[in-house]
Image (spheres, rainbow, N blue to C red):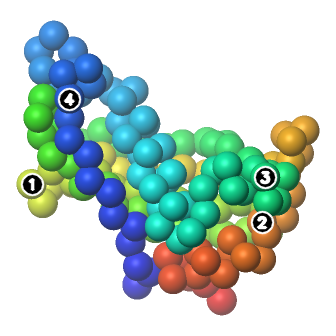
């Protein structure tokens, strides 16, 4: 089993609708923040990838399953790991948990691209840093 990246988030007033329920699009923001923090945890960042490798990581697609709602002032934990990896892309599995209950499951397909938005090979350094978090790394 791969290691998980973990990121905690607290739900603020700005994240909710008038009833105190998290607006559905904000879960995507939470997942993005967790992916950004995952990069930082392994000694990288979006800016380092941009400047050191002349690359960006973009979302190609996302599949998200909303199981239960989060509410104002809930504390959420986001667990992330890499489900699969190709030469130019990877799929990240992300789960949002509230009180030990999974409330959101997502599969995010991410692609490394150059500054002209053309797919490029994921740098070896990045792959090496991702290894402990990859589900079926060979």
Q: In this view, does 44 lie to the left or right of 49?
A: left
Mark positioned earlier in the residue sequence (3 or 4): 4
Q: Is mark 1 on a helix, strand or loop?
A: loop
Label 1, label 2: how far apart the Cα atoms are: 36 Å
**Residue 122: numbered disc:** 2
Image quadrant assignment for residue 87: bottom right
Question: Disc 4 marks which residue?
Answer: 12
Residue 80 place in picture, x, y as percent = 41, 62
Q: Quadrant of the N terminus?
A: bottom left
Is any part of residue 112 visible from this angle?
no
Label 3, label 1: how far apart the Cα atoms are: 39 Å
**Residue 99: numbered disc:** 1
Above or below, 82 relative to 67 = below
Task: Please identify the residue farthest to the top as the structure is shown.
Answer: 18
Label 3, label 4: how far apart the Cα atoms are: 33 Å
Foreground pick, 47 / 104: 47
Above or below, 63 relative to 1 = above
Dot 1 crowding, Cα within 10 Å, few <14, some 14–19, many 20+: few
**Residue 76: numbered disc:** none
Foreground pick, 27 / 34: 34
Foreground pick, 93 / 36: 36
Mark 4, mark 2: which one is toward the viewer?
Answer: 4
Mark positioned earlier in the residue sequence (3 or 1): 3
Task: Look at 43% across and 36% down and name the residue there.
Answer: 28
Question: Disc 3 marks which residue?
Answer: 51
Task: Look at 44% across and 81% down and name the residue there.
Answer: 2
Q: In this view, does 112 lie to the left or right of 40?
A: right
Q: In this view, does 71 lie to the left or right of 83?
A: left
Label 4, label 2: how far apart the Cα atoms are: 35 Å
Mark 1, mark 4: which one is toward the viewer?
Answer: 4
């Amino acid at each position: 089993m791969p290691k998980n990246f973990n990121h905690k988030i607290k739900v603020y007033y700005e994240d909710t609708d008038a009833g105190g329920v998290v607006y559905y699009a904000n879960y995507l923001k939470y997942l993005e923040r967790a992916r950004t923090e995952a990069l930082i945890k392994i000694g990288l960042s979006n800016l380092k990838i941009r400047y050191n490798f002349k690359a960006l990581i973009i979302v190609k697609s996302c599949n998200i399953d909303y199981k239960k709602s989060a509410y104002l002032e809930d504390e959420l934990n986001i667990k992330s790991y890499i489900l699969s990896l190709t030469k130019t892309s990877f799929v990240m599995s992300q789960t949002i948990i509230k009180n030990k209950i999974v409330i959101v499951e997502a599969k995010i397909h991410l692609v490394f691209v150059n500054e002209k938005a053309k797919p490029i090979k994921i740098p070896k350094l990045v792959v090496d840093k991702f290894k402990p978090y990859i589900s079926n790394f060979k």
